[in-house]
Amino acid sequence: MKIINLGLQDYTQTWDAMKNFTQVRDVNTEDELWVVEHPSVFTQGISSKAEHLLENSDIPVVSTDRGGQITYHGPGQLIVYCLIDLKRLGIGVKKIVSLIEVSIMDLLAKYQIKSHLKTDAPGVYVDGAKIAALGLKVKNGRTYHGLSLSVAMELSAFAQINPCGYQGLKVTQMCDLTDNISLDSIANELTQILSNHVTRH
């Protein structure tokens, strides 16, 4: 699996690049994980309801084709886009979601952060507060979009939304739960864990 670090990138341009990659790939195309940060942006999933955006601000709102509800992306949040051929791996959407969640939990455990899942609410939580969100799109058996993990970012923008469609849902991040972390090292560790889980599934 190829791991590509893209740095800080415009959301819409990255989304277009994911769609293009997924459209032109063939049975032999290697799966890729794209590591990226985005400037401040709210993104709406296909089932997202307008009322979950609680106030308008100068942060742009983009309606996307991924699953899930509204979320916020900003600098200091690690995003890993998962360009994976499920058909070739012989697994379904539930399995890849589970592999992504387990990978995030494994990473957090390395930093002595105890995390948990919630029934009917994809993502990873610490003491009921959301630390990682995920939303995927599957086209012709291949995924794009992926996960976002809050590492060391400005969390105040989450107050402008019902995160992932849940009123009053608290959010948290790694830098408030542990010391001595950097986005780059977390990115390297998480992509390795995820790559291992997916290739071994």
Image (cartoon, rainbow, N blue to C red):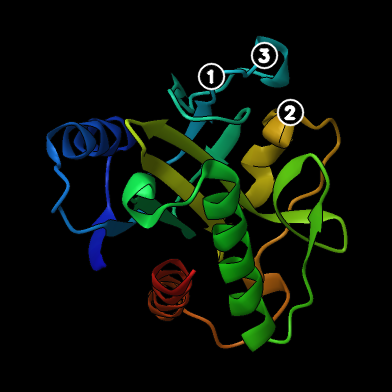
Pointer 2 residue? 165
Residue under the point 56% across and 22% down: 57
What whole-number distance in Å separates the C-alpha atoms at marks 2 and 1? 12 Å
Residue under the point 44% across and 74% down: 200
Q: Is residue 5 shown left or right of residue 125?
A: left
Question: Which quarter of the figure has residue 165?
Answer: top right
Kindly identify the amino acid type of the residue bearing the numbered disc 3: Lys
Q: Position of residue 35 (x, y in %)?
A: 33, 60
Residue under the point 26% across and 67% down: 1
Packing grade of label 3 (10 A; few <14, some 14-19, many >=20) is few
Q: Are marks 3 and 2 in contact (CB under 8 Å)?
A: yes
Q: Which mark is residue 49?
A: 3
Q: Are marks 2 and 1 in contact (CB under 8 Å)?
A: no
Q: Secondary structure at mark 3?
A: loop
> Considering only vertical position in the picture, is 23 above or below 3?
above
Pointer 1 residue? 46
Q: Secondary structure at mark 2?
A: helix
Residue under the point 66% across and 63% down: 173
Kindly identify the amino acid type of the residue bearing the numbered disc 1: Ile
Total labels: the figure holds 3
Kindly identify the amino acid type of the residue bearing the numbered disc 2: Gly
